[in-house]
Amino acid sequence: MASKIKVDQIQTIDGTGTIALQNQLSGMTSASMPTGSTLQVKQQVFSTFTQIASTSYVDTGLTLAITPLSTSSKILVIVGMQCNINNGGHQWMNSRLVRGSTTVKSYDAMLAAESGNPNATVGWNFLDSPNTASAITYKITMRGRDSSNIRINNYYDTNGNSCSTLTLIEIAG
């Protein structure tokens, strides 16, 4: 049988006051959560091999939608991509965080190796303030600075697989 503790109030340790407990948690909503609280988490695990052979920005396949619970919410975007290039040497790659059709942040990374195909985990994060309670879509676009092909999810691991992730965490504002 499960046990319950039923009390109407708790007295402070020094005896000078009491804390009423009636319905304190039953009415808890996302709007009543304190600033900094995590309200929801979404994640895309993307394992499709993608090759980008463009000096113009193209979609990587990392795309995820979220509907914030409040216009004051912030969205923490966390990106982790497994990348390599196919011709050895080095290659600058540029990636962008796009909300809807608006670029909100750009990042640069260099993949480099003395020989073979350089592999790297490229990761970054950004705290966005979208100021909306409507559905929004975040995506990652990427380009190379020359004709080298950038490959996503071609990085070798012990299982012969690879994946990239896009994580969105809504934080109460």
Image (tube, rainbow, N blue to C red):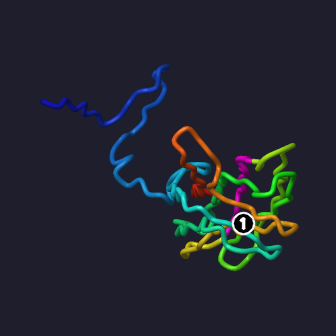
Rendering quarter of residue 147: bottom right
Q: Which residue is disc 1 drawn over? A: 97
Q: Does any portion of residue 11 appear in the rendered image?
A: yes
Relative to 130, residue 101 above or below: below
The answer to which of 106 and 3 lies nearer the viewer is 106
Residue placed at 57% from the left, 50% from the top? 162
Q: Residue placed at 76% from the left, 57% from the top?
A: 85
Seen at 42% across and 36% down, the residue is 19
Residue 129 lies in magenta, yes or no? Answer: yes
Quadrant where the C terminus is found in the figure: bottom right
Residue type at mark 1 is Leu
Q: Nearer the viewer, residue 107 or 121?
A: 121
- Whether residue 94 is situated above or below residue 84 in the rendered picture: below
State left or right for residue 108 relative to residue 59.
right
Magenta span of residues? 119-130
Q: Quadrant of the N terminus?
A: top left
Q: Position of residue 109 (x, y in %)?
A: 83, 54
Q: Residues within 10 Å of mark 1 (few under 14, many from 20)?
A: many
Q: In this rendering, would 64 be left or right of 109?
A: left
From the top left corner, tell me how far across and down residue 121 is, in percent.
70, 47
Task: Please determine whether, in this image, residue 130 is positioned above or below residue 118.
Answer: below
Our reading of the magenta stretch's main secondary structure is strand
Q: Residue at x 59, y 72 (%)?
A: 137
Question: Residue 145 in the image: x percent, y percent?
Answer: 87, 67
Q: Secondary structure at mark 1?
A: strand
Q: Nearer the viewer, residue 156 or 123?
A: 156
Residue 112 position within the rendered picture, expressed as x and y whole percent measured from the top left: 84, 48
What is the count of numbered marks? 1
Name which quarter of the figure residue 47 lies in: bottom right
Residue furthest top as drawn: 14
Would you say residue 126 sits in the magenta stretch?
yes
